[in-house]
């Protein structure tokens, strides 16, 4: 890997294995995890404005927004690539916001996904609607919440020369210019896990079973553990019992030192509990006894095949090496060439896998569908705690405050098991259901509030969405007034 710079932007390049078109990736170290609930979708809208400005071109180009980075990619002659990069940088320097209505409409019709959302639920459970937890909360309406000033501010903060890296599969072409706006690399703080969630299982409104395991950013034993665990669980749930689809693995960079890996499977109807038992208990078994030598050999062979495929000679496959270099440059993760990675994968021992999983299980998060109630244990044999955001009646005293019961007519028309009420406290609202179970909506933890006619929809600190309408309860306008007084204006969205 060779290094130079252009207009203050770091340029990484390595020669392609054979003559051909030049491919360039202009990458920015910003993605979804750098947004907030009110600015969700900002990077996608910046990307859409730039690509709309590019129009049709005589060469291949594409762009993408991931959890951690945004990429603009072109493939063509050196002159075509140079022109593409100059146009992208110029558009980021003076954002073409005249295309906002067009870009917003297209994004609303075909909202992009930063990842397979099957991996998003444990992130939301762990972080709430912040950082990586925002992966879950993409919706087609989010772009309409973004003002021109918000988009310009986001671009000026994150799409700067200090936060950019250019990767090429050949020498930098003559005349290369990257006229990006000035600006440093923004500080990136790690998302803070929600209290009481690490080391638990949790119900969510999902049709999948998923397990989040944390590792160091570069930890070959973690890669091996997830590969072996995925193969074991898929063999038992899919191949043997036929109760789920295949296991998928998703990888998220929490910070430059830490990765969150999520294993996901979708069980057949009525088999969520069985699938959760298998996933969790196989993780415990692997943590206690480690993998077999045959499993580690199969992992090493799989890793060798993957690196050979990705560092081959076809299309974008050879870009995995450069993408690792980009990640290293953006986030300070040590770069390892394919040979080094293969040697490290081959050197993983059963004890390495055991040691990793025993650490990871202390703050793992298992998410299951609401209808499943698995009986799980920790590595010590004690019951695995459940971290539901509901407080169950009988386990805690009722929250004191001003009660807002259903108005008499609605109460008469509503079945007893569906009746609920609210409790207003100095610090927030409590939604109480017919079983007297409670869900807190703390004012200080509200990530976003949307006006829904006379009602309000709030994104709570746990990542749940709560709809509050004044007609649901007697004196409901007092609840709305309390919300309006407590939630800061920058967290409020009003349609139109």
Image: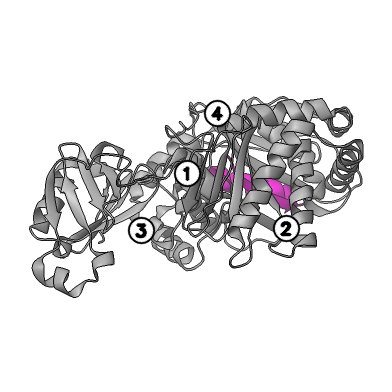
Query: Is residue 54 something one can see in this rendering?
Result: yes
Which residue: 64% across, 50% down?
277
Comparing 400 with 71, the one in front is 400
Q: Quadrant of residue 303?
A: top right
Let me know if residue 79 is in the magenta part: yes
Q: Which residue is mark 4?
A: 162
Q: Which residue is mark 2?
A: 237
How many numbered discs, if any? Answer: 4
The reply to whether dot 3 and dot 4 touch (C-beta < 8 Å) is: no
**Disc 1 to disc 4, C-alpha distance:** 33 Å
Q: Earlier in the sequence, mark 3 or mark 4?
A: 3
Left/right placement of residue 173 relative to residue 303 reads left
Comparing 144 with 463, the one in front is 463
Residue count near mark 4 (Cα–Cα under 10 Å), binned few <14, some 14–19, many ≥20: many
- Magenta residues span 68-90
Which residue: 40% across, 42% down?
36
**Disc 2 to disc 4, C-alpha distance:** 47 Å
Q: Quadrant of residue 330?
A: top right
Q: Of the residues tagged 3 and 4, which is closer to the observer? A: 3
Residue count near mark 3 (Cα–Cα under 10 Å), binned few <14, some 14–19, many ≥20: some
Q: Earlier in the sequence, mark 1 or mark 3?
A: 1
Let me know if residue 62 is in the magenta part: no
Which residue: 40% across, 47% down?
463
Q: Earlier in the sequence, mark 2 or mark 4?
A: 4
Q: Which residue is mark 3?
A: 144
Badge 3 marks a residue whose secondary structure is helix
For residue 125, the mark is: 1
Q: Residue furthest bottom?
A: 413
Q: Is residue 127 above or below residue 355?
A: below
Residue 273 percent location from the top left of the image: 59, 56
Badge 2 marks a residue whose secondary structure is helix
For residue 411, the mark is: none
């Amino acid at each position: 890997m060779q290094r130079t710079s252009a207009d203050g932007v770091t340029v990484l390049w390595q020669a392609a294995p054979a003559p051909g078109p030049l491919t360039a990736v202009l990458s920015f170290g910003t993605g979804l995890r750098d947004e907030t609930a009110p600015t969700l979708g900002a990077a996608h809208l910046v990307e859409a404005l730039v690509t709309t400005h590019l129009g049709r071109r005589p060469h291949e180009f594409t762009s993408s927004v991931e959890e951690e980075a945004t990429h603009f990619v072109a493939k063509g002659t050196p002159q075509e690539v140079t022109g593409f990069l100059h146009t992208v940088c110029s558009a980021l320097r003076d954002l073409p916001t005249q295309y906002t209505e067009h870009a917003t409409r297209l994004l609303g019709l075909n909202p992009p996904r930063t990842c397979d959302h099957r991996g998003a639920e444990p992130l939301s459970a762990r972080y709430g609607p912040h950082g990586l937890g925002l992966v879950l909360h993409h919706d087609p309406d989010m772009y309409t919440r973004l003002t021109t000033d918000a988009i310009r501010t986001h671009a000026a903060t994150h799409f700067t020369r200090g936060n950019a890296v250019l990767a090429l599969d050949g020498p930098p072409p003559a005349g290369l210019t990257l006229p990006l706006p000035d600006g440093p690399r923004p500080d990136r703080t790690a998302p803070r896990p929600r209290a009481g969630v690490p080391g638990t299982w949790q119900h969510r409104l999902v049709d999948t079973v998923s397990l989040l395991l944390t590792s160091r950013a570069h930890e070959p034993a973690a890669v091996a553990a997830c590969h072996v665990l995925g193969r074991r669980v898929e063999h038992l749930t899919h191949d043997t019992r036929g109760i789920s689809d295949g296991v998928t693995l998703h990888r998220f960079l929490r910070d430059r030192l830490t990765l969150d890996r999520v294993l996901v499977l979708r069980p057949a109807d009525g088999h969520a509990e069985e699938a959760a038992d298998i996933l969790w208990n196989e993780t415990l078994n692997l943590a206690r006894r480690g993998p077999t030598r045959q499993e580690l050999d199969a992992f090493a062979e799989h890793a060798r095949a993957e690196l050979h495929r990705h560092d081959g000679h076809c299309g974008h496959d050879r870009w995995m090496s450069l993408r690792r270099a980009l990640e290293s440059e953006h986030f300070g993760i040590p770069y390892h060439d394919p040979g080094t990675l293969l040697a490290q994968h081959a050197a993983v021992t059963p004890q390495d896998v055991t040691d990793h999983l025993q650490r990871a299980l202390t703050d793992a998060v298992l998410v299951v569908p609401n209808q499943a109630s698995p009986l799980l244990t920790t590595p010590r044999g004690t019951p695995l705690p459940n971290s539901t955001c509901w407080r169950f009646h009988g386990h805690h005293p009722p929250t004191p405050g001003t009660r807002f019961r259903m108005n008499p007519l609605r109460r008469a028309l509503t079945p007893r098991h569906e009746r609920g009420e609210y409790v207003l406290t100095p610090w927030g609202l409590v939604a109480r259901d017919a079983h007297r179970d409670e869900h807190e909506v703390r004012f200080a933890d509200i990530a976003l509030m949307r006006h829904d006619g006379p009602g309000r929809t709030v994104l709570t600190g746990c990542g749940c969405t709560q709809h509050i309408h004044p007609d649901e309860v007697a004196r409901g306008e007092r609840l709305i007034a309390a919300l309006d007084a407590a939630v800061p204006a920058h967290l409020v969205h009003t349609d139109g």
